[in-house]
Image: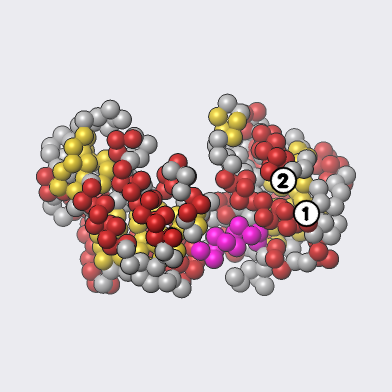
Amino acid sequence: MSKKTVADLSASDLSGKRVLVRVDFNVPLDNGSITDDTRIRAALPTIQDLTSKGAKVILTSHFGRPQGQVNESMRLTPVAARLSELLGKPVKKFDDCIGDEVIQGVAELQNGDVALLENVRFYAEEEDNDPEFAKKLASVADLYVNDAFGTAHRAHASTEGVTHYLPSVAGYLIEKELKFLQGAIEEPKRPLAAIVGGSKVSSKIGVIEALLDKCDKLLLGGGMIFTFYKARGLNVGKSLVEEDKLDLARALEAKAKEKGVAFLLPTDVIVADKFAPDAEAKTVSINDIPDGWMGLDIGPDSIKVFQEALGDCKTVIWNGPMGVFEFEKFAAGTKAIALTLADLTKTGTITIIGGGDSVAAVEQLHLGEQMSHISTGGGASLELLEGKVLPGIAALNDK
């Protein structure tokens, strides 16, 4: 990795130093209880390394979308409690992220202590990347570490702004994300397959185009497939179609052919008479989608075709579900892909789950531990796969 990381810093570099660490603690809450602490656990290696080297660790994160206002339901208090449990030591929680309370609280920290600042998005200046606000955030620290991959594609005060005032390095999570995501694209073990799902082609145009330049096989699922079917002249019933993307769908298929990329669309789909968990469902060939019905998952024949195509692959990137997996009746395709990738990992294939709903599906099936890498950033992982520069990473010091 070309950027300086926490691993490049010794105990003598860190002992007694105040280190501001941008983490992504935007975790799901239900009645004040954290329902998934994956993102908190993902930050532990960086936090523990810093504290073991005698640093005073000051964590900053956003939580939810408070629109630059204090919102009591979006305070980070439950996160501080869970982090204390995971670290096995108290975490001091401040009720603000800048100002006198923070300045005084940081001054009282001992070597190896951990403190958590309040939700940085309680200030509109955070998302505006206001230089004065960034300066105040940075003023309590000697060094900055960015370990929030999920927000690295945003140039905010706590991700990009603070780097103008402090020496800045990457944390272990960002290092791992870049190793897998960039590595998969720039130096993949081949054959490289990409599985792209989700409801709309428009949200994945960039990533599909970029992957067509890199991969050997492209497998498509989710609602976006019906735009491709319609572009081929097939009847898609009431299935989701982006009428203004039909020419684009034809162009993407033509590009795949020109590049020699195996371009796989499902051969059969599970259709429903309405968009509901209790809808009547049946499996049909893509050539026989009835009027008035909508496709909500890939069918059993498609699953077999996809599994066969993935069988010899050495690297697989997956972004987006195969169907409406929130409805049990239309979750079979997504589950089958997740189980297939878990099996491939055992035989040495590098499997990368590229953020978003595919991560939710894998975690729901308790298969997270069986994948090579699960990205913590939906938008950030997509932009990295597209080859875009992430401002939160570009701003860090080079080695």
Main SS of the magenta segment? helix
Q: Residue at x 29, y 57 (%)?
A: 307
**Would you name the residue on which mark 1 appears?**
51
Q: Position of residue 148 (x, y in %)?
A: 61, 52
The stretch in magenta equals 170-180
Rendering coords of residue 335 (x, y %): 36, 46
Mark 2, residues whose alpha carbon is within 10 Å: few (<14), some, or many (≥20)?
Answer: some
Question: Relative to 37, is 281 on the left or the right?
Answer: left
Whole-percent x, y for residue 382 in the image: 45, 56
Say what secondary structure mark 1 lies in: helix
Q: CA distance from mark 1 to mark 2?
A: 10 Å
Q: Are marks 1 and 2 in contact (CB under 8 Å)?
A: yes
On-image quarter of the N terminus: bottom right
Tell me: residue 348, above or below residue 266.
below
**Which badge, 1 or 2, comes first in the chain's sequence?**
1
Q: Residue at the spot x=85%, y=46% of the render?
A: 109
- Horizontally, is 155 left or right of 249 in the view? right
Mark 2 = which residue?
Answer: 87
Residue placed most toward the observer, 137 or 312 = 312
Q: Quadrant of the C terminus?
A: bottom right
Q: Tell me where residue 220 appears, x and y as whole percent.
A: 29, 55
**Which amino acid lies under the numbered mark 2 shown in the image of this protein?**
Leu
Residue 226 visible to an observer of this rendering: no
